[in-house]
Image (cartoon, grey):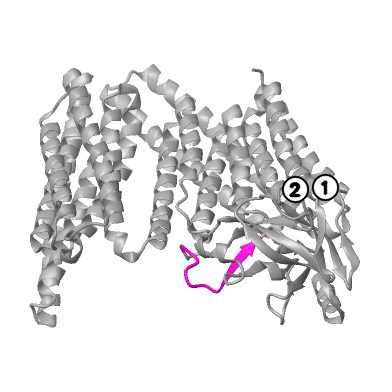
Amino acid sequence: MNQSKTMLIIVVVLTLTLVSMVAKKQYTLNTGALVVLKTTPVDPRSLFRGDYVRLNYDINRLSVRQFPLLQGMKHHDVVFVALEKKDAFWHPVAVFKSISEHKKSWVMIKGSVYMPGRSAVGRMSQVSVKYGIENYFVPEGEGRELENFRNQGDISMQIAVDTSGASGIKAVLLNGEPLYVETLF
Amino acid sequence: MWIGIVMTVLMVMFALLGVGIFLGRHHFATRLKKEVPAWVEQGWMEKPGGDAILASLNGASKHHISTTFSILGVLLFGAGVITFVASNWDEISKLTKLAILFGSIWATFAAALWCRLRELYVWLSEAVLLLGVILFGVNIMLIAQIYHIDAHYPDGVLAWALGALLVAWLMQSKPVFVASVLLVMLWTGMEAFDFREFHWQFMLVWGLQVALLIRCDWRGMTHLMAMSFLLWSGFSFFSITTMTSGFDVIYLMQSYFIFYLILFLLGMHLLLSPKMVSYGEIIQKYAVVVALACFYTLTFPHNGSFSGAPVLWFWVTALLLVVLASLALWHRKRALQQHTRQDYHIWGLALLGVTLLLILVNMTAFSANPLFAIAFNIVYSAMLIWLIFFGMRTGNSLLVNISFLFFAITLLSRYFDTFWQLLDRSLFFMAGGVLLVALGIILEKKRRKVVAGIANEGKAAEQRLS
């Protein structure tokens, strides 16, 4: 194989790797069911730090008593959390190990049990679950502005969840109105 | 902005690596320039041959300087571009950002191709290829930021490392290969420390890197690969002890000892294949240090004797012992077939048998017994003596030095174990001081004698050849 062809293969493979990152995310945002999740501050004194916002949702901490399936879980185990709309927001109503048959009114979001340094849930009353929607990058300096908005009213996140359970942040909402909306370009 | 800072730090690391490689080569070239005229004068080498080597050295030296400085230049240029983009990030639209990111990669690899196709600039292509790989990593991070991709973040480093490996594989580029090895180390470190899991996936990528190393016959890189494996081995130790209870550490240490003994034997096998001798020697050096360090911890009275192993560790140990015994017997068969079997092979096999038996008896014993600790110390000392003997016979002075070092450390440890409680503190330290000085003198004399013997044998062999 000559050098030009070899270099072309390299460029194509590396470019496809980068494009696939964008495509995978955009597929979720464009085809996913939209749910609105209420955010709670990680640290009320400084919610927005640096160039990204750390977001904590109600669905990040699930009660073992409410969802007994979590009892046998380990760090990094995959779970599917069924979300159902109650009032303006979506709330967890059931936990499964796989996307099985579920109610039409439910949206199944895929998460991963997060408890570094622990081998099993054991006697924990709550289990931490991450979904890949916990960080939102904002332009430099705008974190403070978002923090002010949060103090004025409720900030919530519009999340797109596709059929495989993968999720992505579609929009940041202030009092239910879009503040930032994610687009391809 | 933080991405710019991180990338600048990474580039400085790569640059330092480049300078290190350059200085190493420069030292080798300087030494050769001094030695070659002496060899010609001694009559070991014909004058035309010596002149040709010196001429080639001068050419190669200029080439290495060009490559090293071009790598440094390209890295600094890359750092400047990244810092500029990062500081103006907020003013750029999403589409423009993507155009800059993809365009930078395409332009860099096009430039690398241009350099490769022109013989005069082949040396520059290595630096430009490395820049392309660095930009690929920057793009992964920036795209993740633009599209709020908050996935399992070590996967980003893995994608970067695999991209680097692909470039190194297809373009046979050493600097890019080094970058891929460093990135894989970073990846496994993140998985081990941030996610605390036994990261077996490392071995798959490491295996691919070894395949490339053998394919390109980059023998010098074996040290880097060995260090990468040692690092993973250390991370895995940390992960496994976190996952299991502290009680199991001693069994893990014993398993590590057997595993590195297996690697040492693998080195012995490679020594039997003329094409693989240099790989075998390097593997043996690293394997022997870790194996001795692990065995050393088992020689302590409270560590050496553990009654009744948990079932998991019994089977892990049994499996490792079976592999070890099979490799040893296979080596015996190969050495006999090749008529290269030496007396140290026979003694080594016997010692291995005793070690195996001792570990098995200790693992299945129903109660802790101080006799086991004594037995471990005897076998450990025998192993050190065998290594010194093996090093002398094979002309491997490094093995001799390592063995003497462990011998001294062990003697001091036993002194502390035995007399710490028995002697008055002032007497303990005074006697310890005298012992240390005496031990230092005696062992150093012995070590010098053995190493000098090895050097004299080497010279005699060279004279016989000439």
Q: Report the residue marked by disc 1.
A: A31
Q: Is residue A114 visible?
A: yes
Q: First in sequence, mark 1 or 2: give its number.
A: 1
Give residue B375's position: percent from left, percent from top.
9, 54
> Quarter of the image holding residue B347?
top left
Question: Is disc 2 on the same chain as disc 1?
Answer: yes
Give residue A91's position: percent from left, percent from top.
74, 67
* Magenta-drawn stretch contains A120: yes
Nearer to us in this view, B391 or A52 = A52
* Magenta-drawn stretch contains B258: no
* Residue in the picture at 50% in, 66% down: A121
| Marked residue chain, label 2 | A
Image side of residue B48 versus residue A54, left or right: left
**Number of numbered callouts drawn:** 2
Element type where label 2 sits in the image:
loop
Q: Report the residue marked by disc 2.
A: A163
Give residue B234's position: percent from left, percent from top.
39, 54
Q: Which residues are magenta?
A: A119-130
